[in-house]
Image: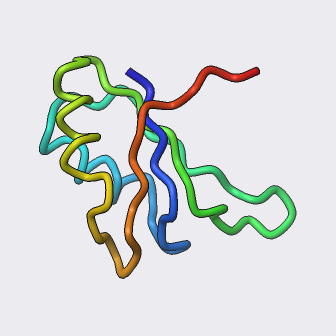
Amino acid sequence: MNIYVGNLNYRVKEGDLQQVMEDYGAVSSVKVVMDRETGRSKGFAFIEMEDDAAAAKAIAELNGAEYMGRTMVVKEARPRA
């Protein structure tokens, strides 16, 4: 399942998110979206998890949770248009 994680602190790195998500199950990939011009995080990321049940549990428990001083938005990612 592909998961959207928003409202992230701009200092969050891919390894930080991977550690958080691995508490729920195997993580295939983590991609923090960066601004091309500044090289700074845009404050959101996409995480791919292999197990849909583990991903659903992570979404349920982490949506609205505080991480590095910000309240995360965690939900299933919508497919690209």
- Percent of width and height locating residue 55: 26, 29
When asked about the image quadrant of residue 34, the answer is bottom right
**Rendered view: 26 above or below 70:** above
Left or right position of 25 against 55:
left
The single residue placed furthest to the bottom in the displayed view is: 69
Query: In front here: 55 or 48?
Result: 55
Count all numbered tags in the image, as a single digit.
0
Q: Decide which of 58, 49 is in the foreground and name it.
A: 58
- Residue displayed at 74% across by 65% down: 39
Percent position (x, y) of residue 21? 25, 44
Location of residue 76 in the rendering, given as x and y in whole percent from the top left corner: 43, 31
Position of 14 relative to 12 (above/below): above
- What residue is rendered at 13% in x and 44% in y? 23
Q: If the image is split into quadrants, where does the C terminus sit?
A: top right
Picture residue at 62% right of the left edge, 20% below the top = 79
Name the side, left or right, on which 73 lies relative to 7. left
Quarter placement of the N terminus: top left
- Direction right: furthest residue: 37
Q: Residue 42 lies in what quarter of the image?
A: bottom right
Q: Nearer the viewer, residue 41 or 5?
A: 5
